[in-house]
Amino acid sequence: MGSRFLNLLKSRQIGGTNQAKANELDSAADPVFLEPKNLGDILQVGHINKAIQASRQNGGMPKGSLSVVETVSITDSITDVIKPGDEQVYQVQSITLKAPGSGSDIAYQLMLSDGTTSAVIAAGTAGAGGTVVAFSPINDSNSGGVPFNITSGCYLVAQAAATLPADVAYHVLQS
């Protein structure tokens, strides 16, 4: 007699588009009681939980090889700054803007967007030839010092009065 959990997952994947739904796993576990004859089923629940945890890279902690500082150019139209793909989760650590050495000050807005609606998280002006720390968990009065997560459904966009280079540091928490 095979485990009902493994039978349920034979045609499924853990993650992806054909994943077992939470209610399917819950209902598969309904008749399981703490009796010796159900030990195999109980162990399979633990096996599935371990697989789900392993699929979340390092238990949700960043891995050094997946930490990135990426330079992007913010323009006068709303620009995707950092947008994870699929089910990736990034944790934004800092955003630094570098204004060109000549010209006037450049106004900017950093926003979170779902592709339709955007919410401003930081706005200001970058002085000519200067560097502005738009977000940092260290001594940052704007953000309260808390790194934030972005996904493919809620990602970082920006807009500036003129082209403005930005360095964005982030950790890939899940890929």
Image (spheres, helix red, strand yellow):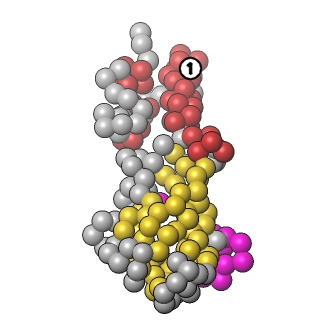
Res. 31 visible in picture: yes
Quadrant of the drawing holding the N terminus: top left
Q: Is residue 136 magenta?
A: no
Secondary structure character of the magenta stretch overall: loop
The image position of residue 50, as x and y in percent, is 57, 31
Question: Which element carries disc 1, helix, strand or loop?
Answer: helix
Asked if 147 appears above or below 77 in the picture, the reply is above
| Number of numbered discs overlaid on the protein picture | 1
Q: Position of residue 100 (x, y in %)?
A: 52, 78
Residue drawn at 51 percent across, 45 percent down: 174
Q: Amino acid at mark 1?
A: Leu
Left or right, residue 144 beside residue 148:
right
Going by the image, does 106 lie left or right of 10? right
Q: Is residue 49 visible?
A: no
**In percent of the image, x 30 and y 33: which residue is there?**
18
Q: Where 145 sits versus 83, above or below?
A: below
Magenta stretch containing residue 147, yes or no? Answer: yes
Q: Is the residue 8 above or below the residue 25 in the image? A: above
Residue at 48% from the left image edge and 90% from the top image edge: 104
Residue 39 lies, in percent from the top left, at 56, 20
Q: Which residues fall within the magenta stretch?
A: 137-150
Identify the residue under disc 1: 39
